[in-house]
Amino acid sequence: QVQLVESGGGLVQAGGSLRLSCVASGSILSINAMGWYRQAPGKQREFVARISNGGSTNFADSVKGRFTISRDNTRKTLYLQMNSLKPEDTAVYFCNADLLDYNANYGDYWGQGTQVTVSS
């Protein structure tokens, strides 16, 4: 069984920073791309950032220059460094991973999410 567990969310003032982590565990053979998505109240889930197995990254326009995504393949961990946070960044942040499990099945997995609240 594969699990993605996020951590690092919380309450922060506008202009502040937070670092999210996502640890993948279970019957994982290899992990391809990993990413972060977010969902604000009353809105659809949206893309935030993504990183390939080789380290190539891409970001939503709304977070470019403020957020950084990175990964530690040895620890099967994904990070999102969020700086200069704005109230509109308030959302539940979800980790996503495309991976191959021990049964040789490719799957798209999601974590349960971590709440980020930015006060003005």
Image: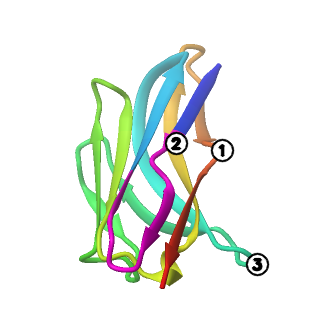
The numbered disc on residue 55 is: none
Q: Of label 1 and label 3, which has the lower sequence position?
A: 3
Residue depicted at x 37% and y 82%: 61
Q: Where residue 7 sits: x, y (%)?
A: 49, 43
State the separation of the CA atoms marked 2 and 1: 7 Å
Q: Residue 3 versus residue 30: which sits nearer the camera?
A: 3
Q: Mark 1 highlights which residue?
A: 112
68 over 4 or under it: above or below: below
Q: Secondary structure at mark 1?
A: loop
Q: Residue 24 versus residue 28: which sits nearer the camera?
A: 24
Q: Residues within 10 Å of mark 3 (few under 14, many from 20)?
A: few
Q: Where residue 83 sits: x, y (%)?
A: 29, 69
Q: Of label 2 and label 1, which has the lower sequence position?
A: 2
Q: Secondary structure at mark 3?
A: loop
Q: Where residue 24 sits: x, y (%)?
A: 48, 30
Q: Is residue 11 magenta?
A: yes
Q: Of label 3 and label 2, which has the lower sequence position?
A: 2
Q: Amino acid under label 1?
A: Gln
Q: Where residue 66 sits: x, y (%)?
A: 28, 74
Q: Mark 3 highlights which residue?
A: 42
20 over 109 or under it: above or below: below
The magenta span reads 6-19
- Direction from residue 48 to residue 44 in the image, left or right: right
Q: Is residue 34 magenta?
A: no
Q: Residues within 10 Å of mark 1 (few under 14, many from 20)?
A: some
Q: Mark 2 highlights which residue?
A: 6
Q: Secondary structure at mark 2?
A: strand
